[in-house]
Amino acid sequence: MNDMVDMAQFVEAKSDQLNADDLIGAPRTITIRRVTGNDGDQPVSIFYDGDNNKPFKPCKTIRRILMGVWGRYASEYVGKSMTIYRDDSVTFGGLATGGIRISHMSHIEKETVVVVMKSKGKKDGVKILPLIMEQKADAAAEWAAKHISELGQQDDLDALNNHIAAGEKAVARLKANRPELHTKVIAAYDLRRDMLTPAEGKPETDMGEAHNDADGVDF
C-alpha cells in the first residue's frame, strides 16, 4: 500500500512570506499574533501562529477589507483569526497569476460586505463570512491573570522585585506577541509598586534587570 503523501509540502514557494501558491488546494485559518508596518512596497506584515517567520503580506485590497471589518488599528487584530485561500482569478499585469483572498473572519456576528476597488475605476463588494472558532485555552491570558493576582501576595518591595524577576522572560514574550496583556501586567506592577512605596518617594531601583530562566511558560 502506498503511503499517504501530502504533495503540498513539496511545492512550497522559496520565500520569506506566505504566497498564494502555498494555499493551492489548502485554505488556511490563521490566528494573528503580531502586525508590523513599514514604508516599502509591501508595507504590512501579518505574523500568525505557526507562520515559521513567513508572514502574510496582504495586498491593498486585503488591507482595505481588514480595515473595513476589524477597524483601522492593527494592534486590535492580535488574537483574531481569518480563513485565507488562493483565488485563481486574481490578475497581475494582465495575467491570471492568482492571489490570496479572505473568505471568513472572526469577531463578526453576520455576513459582512466590504466595498473595495477591484480594478481601475470599478468598485465591487467583497463578502466576508463570520468565522466560528472553537473556544480554546488562552495560555498567555491565563498566565498574565495569575501573575497579576499574585502581586497582592508580595508584602514588600524586595518580594515584589523577586516576583517581577521570576516572570521577566514570560513578560518579554507578552510584549512581543500579546501587547495588550503586556500593558496590563506593567500597569499592575506600577500600581503594586506605588502601594508598597513609602510616601517620601520611590526607591531608585530598576525592577526589570534580574533574570530567571525558570518561568516554565510557553506562549
Image: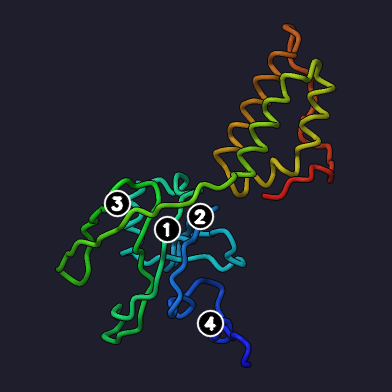
Q: Is the image coloured rainbow, by chain, by secondary structure, or in one colour?
A: rainbow
Question: Cβ–Cβ below 8 Å for labels 3 and 4?
Answer: no
Q: Name the residue under label 3.
A: 68
N-terminal label among 4 and 1: 4
- As measured in the structure, the alpha-carbon distance from the residue carrying label 2 to the one carrying label 3 is 17 Å
Q: Name the residue under label 1.
A: 82
Q: Which mark is residue 196?
A: none
Say left or right for 14 vs 129. right
Q: Which amino acid does label 2 sit on?
A: Ile
Q: Name the image quarter holding residue 189.
A: top right
Question: Cβ–Cβ below 8 Å for labels 2 and 1?
Answer: yes
Q: Mark 2 points at which residue?
A: 32
Question: Of circles 3 and 4, which is in front?
Answer: 4
Say left or right for 108 vs 170. left
Which of 57 and 199 lies nearest the eye of the viewer?
A: 57
| Looking at the image, residue 43 lies above or below residue 213 | below
Q: Residue at x 83, y 37 (%)?
A: 210
Q: Which residue is drawn at 76% across and 31% down?
A: 164
Q: At numbered mark 2, what does the secondary structure look like: helix, strand or loop? A: strand
Q: Mark 4 points at which residue?
A: 8
- As measured in the structure, the alpha-carbon distance from the residue carrying label 2 to the one carrying label 1 is 8 Å
| Looking at the image, residue 183 lies above or below residue 33 | above
